[in-house]
Image (cartoon, helix red, strand yellow):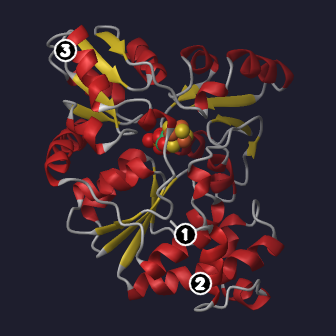
């Protein structure tokens, strides 16, 4: 991938990307959805990119799938679909387009490619990885199978295609408990997130859940003491934690769920104050739609998610560089594990 200076120079030859109050004004309706978190001055910087991307998207017959952790200018400015990992995986099977631009991390783009092999799936920055995905290889799955013979392997979608292919079924944070409960086995192997596994073990006590030693560098940094301190300082705060947090952190929370589950919860409950124990962009992205809620407390930034910028998205659509490829035989096996998860989730939701 080219460095950012070269990308900026190349883009400058084709687009007028100078900060523009006129472009900001033309896109005033788009800005309305993020005006609490993006300043007018910053919007004048982003607006020319948003305009160029949305125009190019039509020319390329492309759709942008964006995870809930994207910055507000991506989430509100250019995304066609936003959601958690499960929603984005399902949407990848539905979208009618020649090109998917994945605003998220690499495993999400791979999942889209596995489910839509005929489409071009572009990743604006191939280095946008994930500590969980990097923690395990197919050999790690084989080792777990050797230690627990006959136990099915449930693998978090935050993994490479090769690891998915070596697993029996995938899960996301929104369906992990459902998937584990539905398996016809007493012992279930969960990989690679030990904290998600430990949180699921509490929800599904009838199963003997064993886990791999992976974790998310964003969620593992929250501590139960930090939440307790915050609650004693501001007792009227509703605390909501992602299940990638350690179990003692989740135990301090009023609710735990996937990023989509968190959005549903605060939208439904409308607490006066909410602390989202997850990636920082979550609260920013929903704060304009929920003006009655004051979002408070600490949040941690995912360095991988934040590698995706408007500039890189424009470059990928312009150059069509950064197409994700998955070996056909690996993709076939990985598709089986992901599709099993999607089918089971849909059946459970019906
Ligand atoms: P969900 O959006 O599925 O809750 O996942 C969070 C996450 O960390 C994705 O990388
Ligand atoms: Fe991976 Fe954690 Fe970043 Fe999600 S937040 S992409 S799990 S490192």
Q: Nearer the viewer, mark 1 or mark 3?
A: 1
> How far apart, in angstroms, are the residues tagged by discs 1 and 3?
44 Å
Q: For mark 1, give the secondary structure.
A: loop
Q: Is residue 231 above or below residue 305?
A: above
The residue that appears at 37% across and 83% down in the rendered structure is 60
Which one is earlier in the sequence, the residue at label 2 or at label 3?
2
Q: Is residue 261 visible?
A: no
Q: Residue drawn at (21%, 12%), measured in percent from left and top?
A: 146
User: Callout 3: helix, strand or loop?
Assistant: loop
Marks 2 & 3, CB-CB < 8 Å contact:
no
Q: Judge: label 3 CB < 8 Å from ligand 2.
A: no
Q: Position of residue 231 (x, y in %)?
A: 77, 22
Is residue 86 something one can see in this rendering? yes
Front of the two marks 2 and 3 = 2
SS assignment at label 2: helix
CB within 8 Å, label 1 to label 2 = yes
Assign the C terminus to one quadrant of the image.
Answer: top left
Please give the residue where the numbered disc 2 appears in the rendered image.
Answer: 10
> Mark number for residue 151?
3
Q: Which mark is residue 2?
A: 1
Q: CA distance from mark 2 to mark 3?
A: 52 Å
Mark 2, residues whose alpha carbon is within 10 Å: few (<14), some, or many (≥20)?
some
To which quarter of the image does residue 301 belong? Answer: top right
Q: Earlier in the sequence, mark 1 or mark 3?
A: 1
Q: Is mark 1 within 8 Å of ligand 2?
A: no
Query: Who is closer to the viewer here, 350 or 157?
Result: 157
**Residue at position x 69%, y 65% from top?**
34
Locate residue 268 relative to residue 324 in the image: left or right: right
Q: Is residue 267 above or below residue 153?
A: below
């Amino acid at each position: 991938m080219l460095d950012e200076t070269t990308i900026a120079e190349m883009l400058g030859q084709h687009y007028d990307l100078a900060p523009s109050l006129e472009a900001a004004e033309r896109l005033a309706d788009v800005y309305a959805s993020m005006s609490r978190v993006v300043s007018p001055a910053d919007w004048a910087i982003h607006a020319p990119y948003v305009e160029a991307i949305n125009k190019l998207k039509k020319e390329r017959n492309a759709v942008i799938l964006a995870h809930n952790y994207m910055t507000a200018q991506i989430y509100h400015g250019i995304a066609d679909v936003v959601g958690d990992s499960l929603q984005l995986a399902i949407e990848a099977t539905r979208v009618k387009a020649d090109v998917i631009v994945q605003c998220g991390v690499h495993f999400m783009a791979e999942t889209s490619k596995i489910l839509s092999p005929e489409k071009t799936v572009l990743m604006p920055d191939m280095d946008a990885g994930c500590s969980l995905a990097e923690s395990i290889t197919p050999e790690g799955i084989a080792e777990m199978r050797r230690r627990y013979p006959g136990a099915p392997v449930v693998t978090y979608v935050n993994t490479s295609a090769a690891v998915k292919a070596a697993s029996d079924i995938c899960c996301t944070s929104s369906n992990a408990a459902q998937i584990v409960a539905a398996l016809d086995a007493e012992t279930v192997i969960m990989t690679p997130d030990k904290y998600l596994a430990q949180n699921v073990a509490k929800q599904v006590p009838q199963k003997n859940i064993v886990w791999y030693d992976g974790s998310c560098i964003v969620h593992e940094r929250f501590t139960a003491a930090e939440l307790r301190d915050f609650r004693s300082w501001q007792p009227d705060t509703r605390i909501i934690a992602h299940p990638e947090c350690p179990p003692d952190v989740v135990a301090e929370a009023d609710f735990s769920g996937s990023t989509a589950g968190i959005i549903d919860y605060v939208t439904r409950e409308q607490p006066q104050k909410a602390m989202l124990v997850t990636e920082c962009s979550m609260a920013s992205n929903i704060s304009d739609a929920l003006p009655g809620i004051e979002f408070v407390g600490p949040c941690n930034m995912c360095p991988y998610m934040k590698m995706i910028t408007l500039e890189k998205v424009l470059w990928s659509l312009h150059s069509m560089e950064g197409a994700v490829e998955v070996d056909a035989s690996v993709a076939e096996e990985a598709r089986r594990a992901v599709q099993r998860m999607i089918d089971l989730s849909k059946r459970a939701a019906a």
